[in-house]
Amino acid sequence: MAKDNDYRNLDDAGLVQELAEVKDGLFKLRFQNATGQLDDVSAIKKQRKQVARINTELRAREIAAAEELDTTRENA
């Protein structure tokens, strides 16, 4: 699992790929939980937090890009 700083170092495509992998892992954990095969239930919570961290970083980049575009338009 990567930490926040690791996500900041990834490019957008890397973040989207990481998000897909984490969501897939979360799906597998939920499936294991439903079938009674999951030993560590807290792993679901950890995966959900990873999804939230990645989505937060993607949204922060989206906002920064929009602000930069807006600043560029104002100066033109």
Image (spheres, helix red, strand yellow):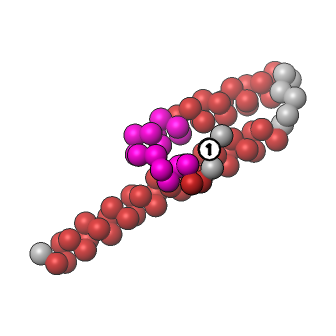
Q: Looking at the rendering, which quadrant does residue 39 occupy?
A: top right
In the picture shown, does residue 2 fall above or below 22?
Answer: below
Amino acid type at mark 1: Ala
Helix, strand or loop under label 1: loop
- Give the side of residue 8 with respect to residue 63, left or right: right
- How crowded pointer 1 is (Cα within 10 Å; few <14, some 14-19, many 20+) is rated as few
Q: Is residue 68 magenta?
A: no
Residue drawn at (75%, 44%) of the image: 45
Residue drawn at (18%, 72%) of the image: 73
Q: 31 or 12: which is nearer to us?
A: 12
Q: Which residue is mark 1?
A: 2
Q: Is residue 8 magenta?
A: yes
Q: Where does the C terminus fall, quadrant-wise?
A: bottom left
Chain part drawn in magenta: 6-19
Residue drawn at (48%, 50%) of the image: 9
Overall secondary structure of the magenta section: helix
Percent from the top left, x then y, of residue 71? 25, 74
Q: Looking at the rendering, which quadrant does residue 30 occupy?
A: top right
In the picture shown, does residue 58 fall above or below 36?
Answer: below
- Give the side of residue 58 with respect to residue 28, left or right: left
Percent from the top left, x then y, of residue 15? 47, 43
Percent from the top left, x then y, of residue 70? 26, 71
Q: Where does the N terminus fall, quadrant-wise?
A: top right
